[in-house]
Image: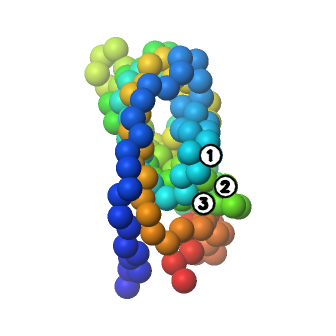
Amino acid sequence: MAVMKSYKPTGVLMGRLAHGSDLLEEITGICRDNSIRMGRVEAIGAVSGARIGYYNQGVSEYEYVTAEQPLEIVAMKGNISVKDGEPMVHAHVVLSDENGDAFGGHLAAGTIVFACECLIEVLDGPVLERKPDDETGLPLWDMA
Ligand code: ZN
């Protein structure tokens, strides 16, 4: 059975990410600078190139798709928790091209901001730490 913990929103940060910055690293840096350990994040905008992960469950490894073209960020959603004592942003993204065709996956470093409006909701409650999970090979939340 799922173990769920309880959180209270304590504030929202909203702003524009720097042109040319790395989308994942920029949001992670905001979390570090603002001592955010638990939260959720969403964003819309555009990127000038993207690197998106797909977790190959058969071999327990991420495979990456890269796109070196302008794309819209149709939607980005994610959460903020802690891994190795540092804030870790886990986000998934849907991107679309000039034809409106969309694809998406696990947001990886290497996705470059053209313009991005980002919202981070800060949550107060038990800190979830990511630990290696034997069943999946993924760094999952330790719910103990
Ligand atoms: Zn993911």
**For residue 80, above or below residue 107:** below
Query: Which residue was labeled with disc 2?
Result: 86
- Relative horizontal placement of residue 73, taking residue 37 as reference (left or right): left
Q: Residue furthest left?
A: 100
**For residue 63, above or below residue 16:** below
| Mark pair 1, 3: CA separation | 11 Å
- Relative horizontal placement of residue 122, taking residue 109 as reference (left or right): left
Query: Which residue was labeled with disc 1?
Result: 32
Q: Is residue 19 visible?
A: yes
**Quadrant of res 27:** top right
Q: Position of residue 86 (x, y in %)?
A: 67, 55
Q: Which one is earlier in the sequence, the residue at label 2 or at label 1?
A: 1
- Relative horizontal placement of residue 54, taking residue 3 as reference (left or right): right
| Mark pair 2, 1: CA separation | 7 Å
Q: Which one is earlier in the sequence, the residue at label 1 or at label 3?
A: 1
**For residue 96, above or below residue 90:** above
| Mark pair 2, 3: CA separation | 5 Å
Please state, as top left, top right, bottom left or bottom right, where the C terminus lies in the image.
Answer: bottom right
Crowding near pointer 2: few (<14 within 10 Å), some, many (20+)? Answer: some
